[in-house]
């Protein structure tokens, strides 16, 4: 994600989207790391839910980039697929952790 944002245009739209997707995209890893070090099951559930939300937000920004034709290359399509898969994984983890 860090390298990806440099591909976005250096204008108002590109700068706003760059900032948003950089925050949500890097937050996934940071919050997942925090979830892995959770002090309790409730703490894990709370943190993994944040990871799920950040993955979904990142997916939103990637889809917006692609659909508005800011970037339409194969890299964006690959990142959309990856973000969608991560969102599904973290949604599943979140649901499973609520049931245990």
Image (cartoon, rainbow, N blue to C red):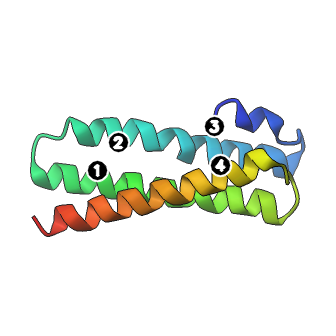
Residue 31 image position (x, y, % from top left): 37, 42
- Pointers 2 and 1 in contact (C-beta within 8 Å): yes
Residue 63 image position (x, y, % from top left): 70, 62
Write down the residue under mark 1.
47
Category of crowding for the residue at label 3, using alpha-carbon neighbours closer than 10 angstroms: few (below 14), some (14–19), many (at least 20)? some
Horizontally, residue 56 falls left or right of residue 39, namely right
Task: Classify residue 32 by image quadrant.
Answer: top left
- State the residue at coordinates (46%, 59%): 87
* Whole-number angstrom distance, CA of label 2 to CA of label 4: 18 Å
* Whole-number angstrom distance, CA of label 2 to CA of label 3: 16 Å
Nearest the eye: 98 or 21: 98
Foreground tag (4 vs 1): 4
Tell me the tag on residue 81. none
Residue 93 in sight from this viewpoint: yes
Is disc 4 placed on a helix, strand or loop?
Answer: helix
- State the residue at coordinates (11%, 52%): 41
Residue 8 image position (x, y, % from top left): 82, 42
Write down the residue under mark 3.
1
* The C terminus: image quadrant: bottom left
Tell me the tag on residue 79. 4
Mark with earlier residue (2, 1): 2
Write down the residue under mark 2.
32
């Amino acid at each position: 994600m860090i390298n990806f944002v440099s591909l976005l245009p250096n204008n108002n739209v590109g700068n706003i989207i760059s900032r948003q997707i950089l925050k949500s995209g890097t937050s996934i890893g940071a919050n997942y790391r925090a979830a892995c070090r959770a002090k309790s099951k409730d703490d894990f559930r709370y943190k993994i839910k944040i990871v799920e939300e950040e993955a979904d937000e990142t997916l939103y920004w990637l889809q917006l980039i692609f659909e508005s034709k800011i970037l339409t290359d194969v890299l964006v399509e690959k990142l959309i697929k990856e973000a969608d898969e991560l969102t599904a994984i973290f949604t599943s983890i979140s649901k499973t952790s609520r049931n245990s």
